[in-house]
Image (cartoon, grey):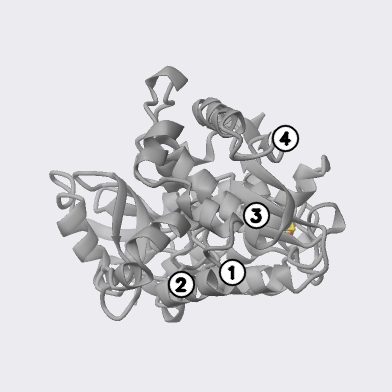
Amino acid sequence: HHHVLNANARNVGAAVEQRQVQPEEISWQRLSDYCSSGGYQLLADCREGRVNIEALKKELEHAGLRGLGGAGFPTFRKWQAVRAEPGPRYAVINADEGEPGTFKDRYYLEREPHGFLEGALVSAWVVEARALYIYLRDEYPGLRRVLTEAIAELEAAEIVAPGFIILRRGAGAYICGEESALIESLEGKPGKPRHRPPFVAQKGLFGQPTLVNNVETVYWIPRIHAQGADWFASQGRHGRRGLRSFSVSGRVARPGVHVAPAGITLNELIEEYCGGMAEGHRLLAYLPGGASGGILPASKADIPLDFDTLQEHGCFIGSAAVIVLSDQDDLAAAASNLLGFFADESCGQCTPCRVGTEKMLTLLERDTWDEETLQQLARVMADASICGLGQAAPNPVLSLLRDFRSELAHSNLIAKG
Ligand code: SF4
């Protein structure tokens, strides 16, 4: 079944280095080590009244912490929205990490599961959650073992009540990374995005107000508190604030997770963090936000990479999955591959996306591209799809038609000139 394919391993023109880490290979920071370096102090301070919600909210606002799963919504505002609703409430962690090219959550979970768990428990405390659910990507079996053991450590140490943290497995569907589909899946139903409103902050899990956060977002909470909001905020570059965990793959010398200033440009990221381009490769294009965030040309590799900064170029950073393509990659093939991915992963409940992704794939496979039909179809999909999958699916094609006209003409896909 195609849904069990590892979406991260899909070839989008550049090979994404991927191997399964076996549970016994993972060496993670145990509870005792985490605690001896000040771990779980913030949680204790919250529970015992030494830190209050207002102060913590101000800290995160000042730090500029935003939803790092891709939406970039300010974290403190999400807290406010959920707290404004009457309880009981739930807290849910999105650990589905299905955006192609994204592997930063895995990076943190493999190393510091307790840093993540403390942040998750603080978030649950903020909204007085009845339970904390973690929805874990099923293609991360090693991490399931790590988290199961880390949660058992917490229960044994009586830091958390038995059963309060519930670890659930995904089933390999990309769409379950969308928060309302994730909640449907948690409820035991097929993962289909819900119409909004109501938003999950109002009616989420089991119809109750629900706080949904990405793994990395909550990971930063104890670190920001320990090192200071000023410290985090001052890490940005080119007028941006904070750090971003870029999952870099493709034609660079050193792919991997690179924690770098928000607002860094691609050129800077490649030079300072990735050891330059891979031997013999020249930068042609890059995907700033996995499969969904569009494709930018080498001539636009000096734009600050952050939320909001790529909008005018029809792109977005999303989960900061940067895929670097070179002169040895075929852009049209990459676009078809991405459309194939969206067509496979469409949940099928709305026509613009279900039919549109298939139709667009067919149009891309022709010897000459029908630009007008592609543009019209893209508009319908963007305007009328229920969720981000269908809305973003045309992005790779729109990017090529906008910024790579000479390459397309060179392949005779569009007319020259
Ligand atoms: Fe499902 Fe696609 Fe519609 Fe989203 S846009 S609800 S994935 S059919």
Q: Is residue 179 above or below residue 174?
A: below
C-alpha span from label 4 to label 2: 30 Å
Q: Residues within 10 Å of mark 4 (few under 14, many from 20)?
A: few
- Judge from the rendering whether residue 281 lies leftward or rightward of residue 137; answer left or right: left
- Judge from the rendering whether residue 41 lies leftward or rightward of residue 27; answer left or right: right
Q: Give whichever of 415, 126 is nearer the camera.
A: 126
- Disc 4 CB within 8 Å of nearest ligand 1 atom: no
Residue beneath label 3, please?
A: 124
C-alpha span from label 1 to label 2: 10 Å
Name the residue located 69 percent from the left edge and 75 percent from the top edge: 383
Marking on residue 53:
1
Name the residue located 69 percent from the left edge and 73 percent from the top edge: 81
C-alpha span from label 1 to label 3: 12 Å
> Of marks 1 and 4, which one's residue comes earlier in the chain?
1
Q: What's the residue type where badge 3 is placed?
A: Ala
Circle 4/circle 2 CB separation < 8 Å = no
Residue beneath label 2, please?
A: 59
